[in-house]
Amino acid sequence: MNQICIGLFGNGVVGKGFRHLISATGGAVIKKIAVRYPAKHPTLQAPLLAASKEEVILDEDVNVIVEAIDDEVAAFGILQLALQHKKPVITANKKMVARYLPEIIRLQIEHKTPVLYEAACCAGVPVVRLLQDYYHSATINKLEGIINGSTNYILTAMQLFRFKFDHALQLAQEAGFAESDASLDVEGKDGLHKLCILVRHLWSAPVAIDQIVHTGIQNLLPQDLRLAEQLQGCIKLVAVTERTGPGSINAYLLPRLVLKQDPLFQVSQENNGLVIEDLFKGQHFLHGKGSGGLPTATGLWNDIVASRRGYRYQYIDTGSECLSLDYGKEIAVHLSVAAGQFLPATVSGRLHEYAADGSCRYWTGRLSLDELRQDDWWKQEGVSLLDISGLEAEDELELLDHLKTALALQKDIFQPV
Ligand SMILES: NC(=O)C1=CN([C@@H]2O[C@H](COP(=O)(O)OP(=O)(O)OC[C@H]3O[C@@H](n4cnc5c(N)ncnc54)[C@H](O)[C@@H]3O)[C@@H](O)[C@H]2O)C=CC1
Ligand SMILES: N[C@@H](CC=O)C(=O)O
């Protein structure tokens, strides 16, 4: 077999990590690299530095394209040109995959050339191929997980080390965990992109980005973190997709109160963790580095090797059903609503207002995914929503007592630095 000769797009955190991996392992050659602003990369010079995507893709020695850029439209253009020239594409770009997946599938079939994107989904945790090849959607109940490393890193720093949000975010950016536009991480869009990919490979269900109920950690308040602590838990941004009936699934991404007994409790820093629940095999737990240059580079390299062995995603419906998205699920929520903010009457009429302090009023109750999807009052600044379904209580009054006691106990235990 001829040598692996790579055309690389991007020389940022992931591009540099990938170059480091290739020079450390020596398993391949990088023949061409393209970047957006060459002046920012003075150590890259021609002939290694390419002036256009054509120069990379049309180079006759280049036999695989690795795409690690932060622009999904340009990335899709690279992918199209590469497939037209029968060059396999290995990408870390979840934004592109989530946005263009139906076209990416069509182009792979048309040009009989694979696109692989393990690195795009949980970086160093090998989940896409596992879902695609090992599990059978007919026996899966549920997948839930922490699939964004930056928010998990930020929450860990805030909860364990008492860092302020801005400081924790800055550290996540400096470490190369965050997207170049970090609001994608913080507001849950990055997790959303990955959840779309997971849903596609777990259930063979094509789901569009705007169909999934989601938010990030942008609205969490110090009180929320304190409440979690008083309940012997912590807060994590958790993605969920589960079977809800014959022919239907749901999918959502929300901040959740995670208690000690939950396997996700131990997932800290930039790590990701996924629990896959099979009807007959029980739970499987995947855990590993979910962001960073080198873990992502490893995901890219593993895909290159797989593509050389002829691997490609099949995108076949492994189950017998055609699944549709179900918004019926009701989620137990705790809401902190800052002074001056109001809940819509239709919602507040059905929730318990159970406490208030000078700055916030606290509510709890149940909201359906449908309500969350229809209305986005809960994403406004000053409103923070926490999924508390993990809190076990015999009845609602017991749950309220539990929450009231925890709130009363919080006092001065949380002093962010
Ligand atoms: N940083 C991480 O931990 C992970 C990042 N990813 C994904 O990998 C990709 C790259 O991420 P980072 O390296 O962190 O970003 P970065 O901001 O560090 O680097 C982006 C690179 O893309 C290049 N670029 C942008 N547009 C280009 C174009 N049209 N042509 C050629 N080069 C272009 C820039 O010159 C830069 O070198 C993104 O899609 C990101 O979502 C995936 C998994 C983990
Ligand atoms: N910004 C992403 C990088 C990996 O996908 C994250 O923090 O998870």
Image (tube, rainbow, N blue to C red):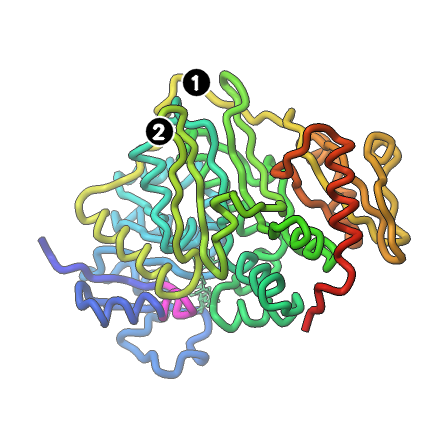
The stretch in magenta equals 9-16
**Number of callouts in the render?**
2
Is residue 76 visible in the rendered image? The answer is yes
Q: In this figure, which residue is indicated by the disc labeled 1?
A: 321
> Few, some or many C-alpha atoms within 10 Å of disc 2 (few <14, some 14-19, many ≥20)?
few
Q: In this figure, which residue is indicated by the disc labeled 2?
A: 281
Query: At label 2, which amino acid type do we have?
Result: Lys
Q: Is residue 18 left or right of residue 244?
A: left
Query: At label 1, which amino acid type do we have?
Result: Glu
Residue 234 magenta-highlighted: no
Q: Is residue 106 left or right of residue 227?
A: left
Indicate the position of residue 376 as horizontal and vertical percent values: 74, 41
Residue 14 magenta-highlighted: yes
Mark 1 falls on what kind of element? loop
Q: Is residue 79 above or below residue 143?
A: below
Residue drawn at (86%, 57%) of the image = 359
> Few, some or many C-alpha atoms within 10 Å of disc 1 (few <14, some 14-19, many ≥20)?
some
Indicate the position of residue 1 as horizontal and vertical percent values: 9, 53
Q: In which quadrant of the rendered image does the C terminus lie?
A: bottom right
Residue drawn at (61%, 57%) of the image = 186
Indicate the position of residue 336 as horizontal and vertical percent values: 78, 49
Identify the residue at the far left of this view.
1
Asked whether the beta carbons under mark 1 and mark 2 sit within 8 Å of each other, the answer is no
Q: Is residue 380 above or below residue 388?
A: below
Q: In what quadrant does ligand 1 lie?
A: bottom left
Residue drawn at (69%, 35%) of the image = 332
Is residue 78 visible in the rendered image? The answer is no
Q: Residue 294 got which mark?
A: none
Q: Is residue 155 left or right of residue 341?
A: left
